[in-house]
Amino acid sequence: FTDPPAAERQIELILGVLDAWMAAHVGDAPAPAAPAPAPKTASPEEAMRSLVSWVSVE
């Protein structure tokens, strides 16, 4: 903006919209549940077998 008052009004408008969105979506939202346990990771040998099954070497 070349007009400082217009820029300030635009910033105030954007901040007002962000405040309203946060109040609606973040304010009293319950805390997220504990994350699910991590899936079992495959051994390097299992991972390699799985990868090789997708690769075709001719």
Image: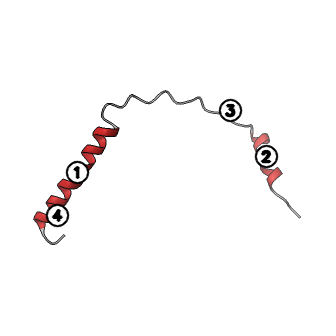
Q: How far apart are the two marked residues, 2 and 4, measured between alpha carbons?
A: 56 Å
Circle nearer the N terminus (1, 2)? 1
Task: Looking at the picture, tell me which residue is in the foreground, 49 or 34.
Answer: 34
Q: How far apart are the two marked residues, 4 and 3, measured between alpha carbons?
A: 53 Å
Task: Using residue 18 as the reference point, say whether residue 48 is left or right of it.
Answer: right
The nearer-to-camera label among 2 and 4 is 4
Q: Amino acid at mark 3?
A: Lys
Q: Which mark is residue 50?
A: 2
Q: How many residues crowd mark 4 within 10 Å: few (<14), some (14–19), many (20+)?
A: few
Q: Which residue is under mark 3?
A: 40
Tell me: residue 22, above or below residue 17: above
Circle nearer the N terminus (1, 4)? 4
Q: Amino acid at mark 1?
A: Leu
Q: What is the secondary structure assignment of the residue under circle 3? A: loop
- Residue 23 occupies quadrant: top left
Q: Amino acid at mark 2?
A: Ser
Q: Amino acid at mark 4?
A: Ala
Task: Using residue 11 as the reference point, say whether residue 32 is left or right of it.
Answer: right
Label 1 with label 4: CB-CB less than 8 Å: no
Q: Which residue is under mark 4?
A: 7
Q: Which residue is under mark 1?
A: 15
Q: How far apart are the two marked residues, 1 and 2, measured between alpha carbons?
A: 50 Å
The furthest residue to the bottom: 2
Q: Position of residue 33 (x, y in %)?
A: 47, 27
Task: Using residue 9 as the reference point, say whether residue 35 is left or right of it.
Answer: right
Q: How far apart are the two marked residues, 1 and 4, measured between alpha carbons?
A: 12 Å
Task: Using residue 9 as the reference point, say whether residue 56 is left or right of it.
Answer: right
